Image: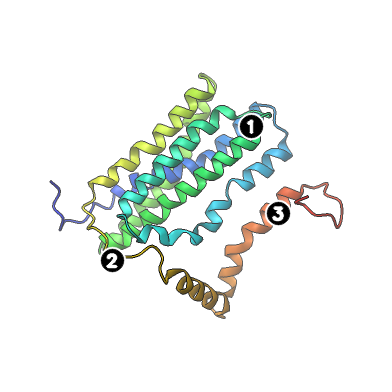
Amino acid sequence: MRDASRPPAPWLFSLLILPLGISVGFKFTALPFLLAKAGVPVDRIATLASIVHLPAALQFLWAPLVDVKLRRRTWLVIGALASSLCFCFAIPLMDASHLGQMIALLLCAGLADSTVSVACGGLLVTMLSAPAQAKASAWQNAGQLGGGALGSAAVIWLAGRASLPAVGVFVAAMIALPALTAFTIAEPAPLPSPWFRGRLPQIGKEIWALVRSPDRRWSTLLLLAPWASVLRASCGPTAPQGESCWR
């Protein structure tokens, strides 16, 4: 049995973040490739690629979830497994006639793998000392960037040699298996607490204080900036002047 007093090795965080890295890398690289291969127009690909990144911009809304009821390592595994299932079912739908269902599944995957990001960060700051946190952060960045790049390369290579359902199973395995290493962390059980009782009003007050802070206005604006990109991509270059993009 793992010693509960021994913190996890910093390199372990390169594996814990792999589900997120592979998911994000797929959306940035493999998704446009597969959609283009399926004959989807370039402007439509740009719109869809923008939409699937919405959960990353909004994850602060459900980030407090990992602090209640379950261990963070458990939330991480749940998020990775849910994301892997969504990818497994979404990738075979990669054609022009099933774009709505495919994007809905990828949005659900984004909701799930954002939990991986939040839980991984929570484990890092609660289980490690300050010097070890710096090392773990470096490993985490390496895992996220490396997983995204190498995972996307593997998907593109496999897509030319196997069916889309096989690619879906492959991506699901790449996302789910590394997350299981979270169970090697001897994280203590969380303190008993009610589901969000009194927490949501407090979170709202903290967000409002952040927005009103003169020192945080520009960073808040940068946080909200992805909305402008999504809106522009959804409108497209030919949207009539003055007409709604969401009609």
- Residue 135, image x, y percentages: 31, 57
Instruction: Please state which amino acid type lies under the numbered disc 3.
Output: Leu
Instruction: Please state which amino acid type lies under the numbered disc 2.
Output: Ala
- Viewer-proximal residue, 144 or 246? 246
Sequence-earlier tag: 2 or 1:
1
Instruction: Please state which amino acid type lies under the numbered disc 1.
Output: Leu
Q: Label 3 vs label 2: CA separation?
A: 40 Å
Which residue is at 59% across, 35% downward?
102
Classed neighbour count for the residue bearing mark 2: other residues with Cα under 10 Å, few (<14), some (14–19), many (≥20): few
Sequence-earlier tag: 1 or 3:
1
Are the residues tagged 2 and 1 within 8 Å (C-beta)? no
Q: What residue would you read off at disc 3?
A: 231
Q: What residue would you read off at disc 2?
A: 130
Q: What residue would you read off at disc 1?
A: 35
Tell me if residue 121 comes above or below residue 102 in the rendering.
Answer: below
- Residue 11, image x, y percentages: 29, 49
